[in-house]
Image (spheres, rainbow, N blue to C red):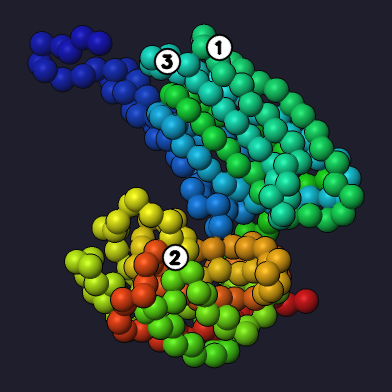
Amino acid sequence: MRINSANKLSFSERVLITASCLMFVLLFLQGENYAQSANKYNPTPVRSREIAGGVDSGKTLYYAFTAGPGEVRASVAIMRRPTATGATEYDVTFEDPKGLRLQRMAAINGGAGESSQEKTFRLQRKTRVLMIVKLSGSLDYKIKLDGAVKLDREEESLPIEDDFSVIKTIRVDGKTGFNWVDTGIVVKAGDVVRLSATGEVDVNAGWGVHGPEGTREFFTNASYPINSRFRYGLAARITLGSGRNFLETQKWAYADAREMRVTRSGILWLTVNDDEPDDNTGQFVVEVALARRSR
C-alpha cells in the first residue's frame, strides 16, 4: 500500500485498514470465545455442538458433556496453517467416567489442506463423557458433536454466594500426602464444592514453608498425590467408594480452583500435595461449603 506525498493515507486506504483490523479481531475472538481447560479433572463443559480454535504448538485440552442413551456422532476437521513447518497431528478420544474408551479419531497430516474424519459411538444410558483433544503442530481445528448429546447450560456454571452452606471445618495435617483425609462429606453430581483454607506447612528439605496455594517450585523427579502446576499446598479429590476398590473421579489443587462442580457423586477427600510428607510440620484448616444442585 502506497502512502501519499503528504504522508497521509487516502480515505479508501483508511477504510481498508480499518476493515482488516476488525476482521483480525473477530477471528481472534472467535478462537478464544470457547474456554479451554488443560486440567483433566476440571474439564471445560461443552455448551455448543461446535468447538473451534487454533494452536501454534502442542496442546492437550479436556471437555465434558452428557450424552445418551443413543448414538453420538462426532467429527473433527484440522487445517494445517500455511506458516506450519512440520506435520500436524490430532487425537480426539472419548472416555466414560471409568476411563474406558468409547471412540477415537486420530491422524497425522504432513501436507497442506484439511484432514477430517467422522465416527459414532452408542451409549446404553445417560453418561458423562470426557473428550480428550491432543493437538500437535500449527493448525486450526473444528470439532462437531451431534446425536444424543445434552449440552451443559450456561446458567449452571457456578452458583451465587447465597447458595452456599458451610458443611464442616477440616484440619489437614502436613504429614498427610498419599494418606488422604476422608472428610465424610458425600457430594452429588451437580453440586459445587467451595474450599476456604488457611494455615502453613513446612515441607522441610529446603523446599520452604507454604500456604494452601502451594508453590510452582518443587522437586520434579517424584510422584505426587496430584501432578498439578502447584505442589506442597492443599489438594482435593472426589472418589466413588472409599475402600480398596475406589475410583478417583475428580482431583484438583486448591491454587487451581477454590470452587469445583461435581461431575459424579462421591466422597470428598483432602490432603497436602507432597510426595514425602513424613518430616513436614504444620497444617491447613479448611472450611468446606456446598451449593447443592436443585433437584
Mark 2, secondary structure of its residue: strand
Question: What's the distance in space between the residues labelled 3 and 2, CA to CA?
Answer: 35 Å
| Residue drawn at the location 62% of the way across and 59% of the way down | 154
Please name the residue that numbered disc 3 is placed on: 86
What residue appears at the point 48 percent right and 28 percent down from the top-left corner? 136
Q: Residue 80, how many percent across, how many down?
A: 50, 18
Q: Nearer the viewer, residue 152 or 280?
A: 280
Closer to the camera: disc 1 or disc 3?
3
Q: Nearer the viewer, residue 245 or 87?
A: 245
Residue type, numbered disc 2: Ala
- Distance from label 1 to label 3 (Cα)? 13 Å
- Circle 2 or circle 1, nearest the eye: 2
- Which residue lies at the image location 21% right of the left edge and 19% below the top edge? 9
Structural crowding at the residue carrying mark 3, measured as other residues with C-alpha within 10 Å and reported as few (<14), some (14–19) or many (≥20): few
The numbered mark, 2 or 1, whose residue comes first in the sequence reads 1
State how far apart marks 2 and 1 are (Cα): 40 Å
Q: Nearer the viewer, residue 29 or 108?
A: 108
Q: Which mark is residue 81?
A: none
Q: Amino acid at mark 1?
A: Gly
Q: Where is residue 274? Give x, y as percent.
A: 38, 67
Q: Which residue is mark 2?
A: 253
Q: Is residue 239 left or right of residue 251?
A: right
Is residue 184 among the parts visible in the rendering? Answer: yes
Mark 3 residue type:
Gly
